Image (tube, rainbow, N blue to C red):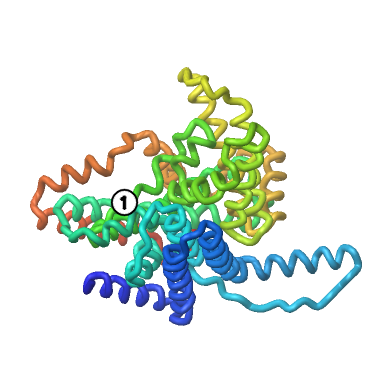
Amino acid sequence: MARKCVLLAASYLFYGWWDWRFCFLLLGASLTAWLAGIGISKFKSEHEQRIVVTLSVGALLCVLGFFKYYGFFLSSLQDVLFAIGWQRDLPFLQIILPVGISFFTFQAISYVVDVYRKDIATRTNPIDVLLYISLFPQLVAGPIVRAADFLPQLERKSSLTKTAVCFGLVLCIFGLFKKMVVANYLAVDLVDPIFLDPTSYSSLMLMLGVYGYAVQIYCDFSGYSDIAIGTAALLGFQFKKNFDQPYRASSLQDFWRRWHISLSGWLRDYLYIPLGGSKFGTWNTYRNLFLTMFLGGLWHGAAWTFIIWGSLHGAWLAMERALTKADDTRRSKIKTLVGWLITFHVVCAAWVFFRSSDLSVALDWFAGLANVSTDSYGLTWFTIALIALPLAAQFLPSNSVERITVRFAENALAFVALAFILCLSAILWLAPPGTAPFIYFQF
């Protein structure tokens, strides 16, 4: 119990360091989930349990919706009213989006639904639920941890092995390098300038800009996930992998098995399957795929660019399902290569909308492709290497981290600590000046 209380206090201190007032929001979401679990266990009838789930999940989604979508809804409504000649003064409020609200809301919903489905037992001790939702390594940007995976670990006696320490340190170093060096340099030297004003760049630079963003967002987000999973390992917890070389995928379905695995799994289990999944005919399957990705896009942010991003993924997933025979398991190397090229560029085309500050910037980017030019003013070989090498690394053995961990674990802890310090020093020396926030902090 003492360990749980220390971790809980540390997590709230970590979250409150940004703005202590939002700790009450985190606490409210956690208590709502805990009380809902208690309510589900107290009521015996299916109808009463459904009422508890509906009210608790509805309350959590209402809070999330208010903070994320209030301004978007009112601005869109004002545009509609203006278009039909009904101008009105609407009650706009200046709302600060709490860091990580989507992630801890999804975890709270996960707990409630898993208790209702009897995947986990109700926790009578509120400390367990509060710690599950607020544990600081994954609190502000994931990965989304399932209650069924995390809560049983609280019951086991914590034993930190040498292998776990090496695994945690290796992941933290990889994550810091991906974020502080690769992602930050690409953002400053290439991506940010191009997406600030796409009309000022050649078609070649526009393409390199979106390739750079594909690498930047991967290194930024997977870097954070590596640090979160590595830190959890150092605390004695095991989190599942959140990225698995997504840019080697040869279909969009395969991409979503590899990209932000915790979110794609959450959307599948708590949205796609409840909508009906693939059980009720072909067209319902296409509809459910589209709706799942549409809502996934809306989850990322209250903007038309995110809605289009999600819609593109949903439409392409439905089209893939329509064109791919379920029993066609034979894939030649040529088909795999073509599938990889198409998938990568579909993902990159969607990234244009995801990265653009508004719809006009995205349209400017696509319009710029028509002006074919190979002008590469400002491009350096260093920038090209930052794009090419991480993409090439997608095709390394998928267990590379585990193999490196085994090698490190064969040495004394003093050697491991020295190697970690030297690697950290090298990263700090290589990294560009300034501090860039993680991209997914805004979600």
Q: Is residue 387 above or below residue 416?
A: above
Q: Position of residue 269 (x, y in %)?
A: 49, 47
Provide residue 237's location: percent of width, then percent of height: 27, 57
| In the image, farthest residue toward the left | 412
Rendered residue at 40%/60% (across/down) = 432
Q: For the residue marked with disc 1, what is the amino acid?
A: Phe
Instruction: State the residue in front, 300 or 421.
Output: 300
Name the side, left or right, on which 185 lies relative to 195. Answer: left
Q: Quadrant of the N terminus?
A: bottom left
Looking at the image, the residue that sits furthest to the right is 85
Apparent side of residue 89 relative to residue 211 in the rendered image (left or right): right
| Kind of element beneath mark 1 | helix
212 vs 409, nearest the viewer: 409
Percent across and percent down for residue 336 are 48, 24
In this figure, which residue is indicated by the disc labeled 1?
Answer: 174
Q: Is residue 266 visible?
A: yes
Furthest residue in direction front, as rendered: 45
Which residue is painted at 44% across and 43% down in the image?
A: 381
Q: Is residue 433 above or below residue 222?
A: below
Residue occupying the point 68% across, 56% down: 304
User: Residue 273: horizontal and vertical position, in percent?
Assistant: 54, 44
Q: Quadrant of residue 50?
A: bottom right
**Corner quadrant of residue 30:** bottom left
Q: Quadrant of residue 355?
A: bottom right
